[in-house]
Image (spheres, rainbow, N blue to C red):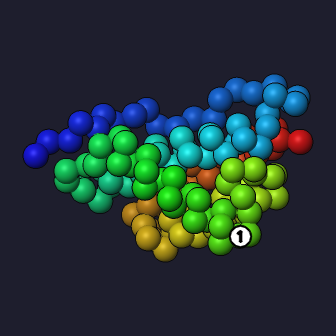
Amino acid sequence: MTSASTSPERYRAPELPNDETVTPSFVRDELLKCFQSANHEFMTAMNQNPIPSDSEIQQQIKQFVSGAFQSCGSSIENPTKDGIIAAIEECKKSAQKMMGEKGASIIDHHYEEMMKILRKLK
């Protein structure tokens, strides 16, 4: 069975102005995109075959990130800056436990990209 999934470009934070256009909802949505990209990289690093479809990955990522928000007592539907920070840290810790050294560079890259966006959030 072959996968319908295509390997996306490695996630890069979008260039953003320092103003009110960067909302918590925008950052949350970018976090989901970032984790989808990282997930593809993890699967490649772990030689997972077949790679799930994009829709399956999106569902897994939504559950993973939602769980991180929930474990921090934060709302993914109505995110706050503090809630996003806590959820990103929770996601990072969970990913490190799952991936270990094999995933360290992937985790570090995506974490830094998310911090670029988070720094723009007022």
Residue 106 image point, x, y percent: 48, 53
Q: Which residue is mark 1?
A: 72
**Residue 10 vs residue 108: left or right?**
left
**Residue 90 vs residue 22: left or right?**
left
Relative to 85, does residue 29 appear above or below in the rendering?
Answer: above
Relative to 68, does residue 37 appear above or below in the rendering?
Answer: above
Residue 119 image point, x, y percent: 80, 44
Residue at left 54%, top 70%? 94
Which of the 4 image quarters holds residue 5? top left
Residue 51 image point, x, y percent: 26, 49
Relative to 114, does residue 14 appear above or below in the rendering?
Answer: above
**Circle 1 sits in a helix, a strand or a loop, which is it?**
loop
Q: Quadrant of the C terminus?
A: top right
- Looking at the image, the residue that sits furthest to the front is 77
Q: Nearer the viewer, residue 78 or 4?
A: 78
**Residue 8 vs residue 93: left or right?**
left
Residue at left 70%, top 37%? 26
**Residue 45 vs residue 79: left or right?**
left
User: Does the image show residue 109?
Assistant: no
Q: Nearer the viewer, residue 18 or 56?
A: 56
